[in-house]
Every structure is written in structure tokens, then in C-alpha cells.
């Protein structure tokens, strides 16, 4: 399968939720050109974000980037393989 086909298949997983690194998260984006998938980590109380001067501005969930490619050419990263197994076991989101 070519890379764009694989990235398209990854994009079908957008919106799925799982527990990754012991925290609840949701796949929110697949950035094929950058070679990462982006997770939004859900916290009961999101961390405080600051402005450039260190003053508190708002609260927002943390974003985590997971690399798609592994260290060897044509190989998927271990992190992505772990995430895919968790997203697959989470089931499909309901579609109306």
C-alpha cells in the first residue's frame, strides 16, 4: 500500500477515543506530510495555558504527536502500532 493510501486509512480513525499512556485521548488529526498523528489528551481539569509573558490565559487539553514512521525505512513506529491496537479495540464510533 502506498503512503497516501495508508494516511487515508489512518484518517478514517479520526474521532476515535481510547486510553493511551494511561490517559483518555481522542485522535483528532493525521498530518501525513509531517509524519505524525495528533491526539487530544482529555483531563478532568485541563492544564492552564500561558501567553508569551507567562501569564495564565485559558485552559485547554494537551495535544500529543505520535510519529507514524519507525527508525527503519518503511517501518511503522512502535508508538503508532500501540496506538492502532488501542484504537482498534475501542470500536467504531457510532455513525448516524
Image (cartoon, grey):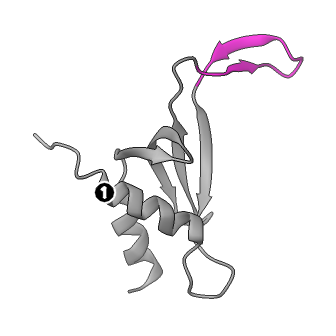
Stretch of the chain drawn in magenta: 46-60
* Residue carrying label 1: 89
Q: Residue at x 34, y 47 (%)?
A: 16
Query: Percent position (x, y) of residue 6?
Result: 40, 74
The answer to whether residue 39 is above or below residue 1 is above
Residue 53: in sight, yes or no?
A: yes
Tell me the SS state at disc 1: helix
Q: Residue furthest right?
A: 53
Judging depth in this view, the residue of 33 and 54 nearest the camera is 54
Judging depth in this view, the residue of 49 and 91 nearest the camera is 91
Give the image quarter of residue 35. Answer: bottom right
Judging depth in this view, the residue of 33 and 58 nearest the camera is 58
Q: Residue at x 42, y 85 (%)?
A: 2
Residue 12: in sight, yes or no?
A: no
Give the image quarter of residue 17. Answer: top left
Q: Residue at x 54, y 26 (%)?
A: 43
Q: Residue at x 47, y 40 (%)?
A: 25
Query: Total marks drawn?
Result: 1
The answer to whether residue 79 is above or below residue 60 is below
Query: Percent position (x, y) of residue 22?
Result: 54, 43
Judged left or right of residue 21, residue 6 is left
Quarter placement of the N terminus: bottom left
Amino acid at each position: 500500500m502506498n503512503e497516501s493510501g495508508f494516511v487515508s486509512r489512518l484518517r478514517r480513525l479520526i474521532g476515535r477515543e481510547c486510553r493511551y499512556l494511561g490517559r483518555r485521548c481522542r485522535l483528532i488529526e493525521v498530518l501525513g506530510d509531517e509524519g505524525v498523528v495528533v491526539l487530544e489528551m482529555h483531563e478532568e481539569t485541563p492544564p492552564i495555558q500561558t501567553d508569551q509573558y507567562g501569564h495564565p490565559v485559558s485552559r485547554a487539553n494537551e495535544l500529543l504527536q505520535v510519529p507514524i514512521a519507525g527508525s527503519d525505512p518503511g517501518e511503522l513506529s512502535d508508538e503508532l502500532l500501540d496506538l492502532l491496537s488501542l484504537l482498534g479495540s475501542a470500536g467504531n464510533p457510532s455513525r448516524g
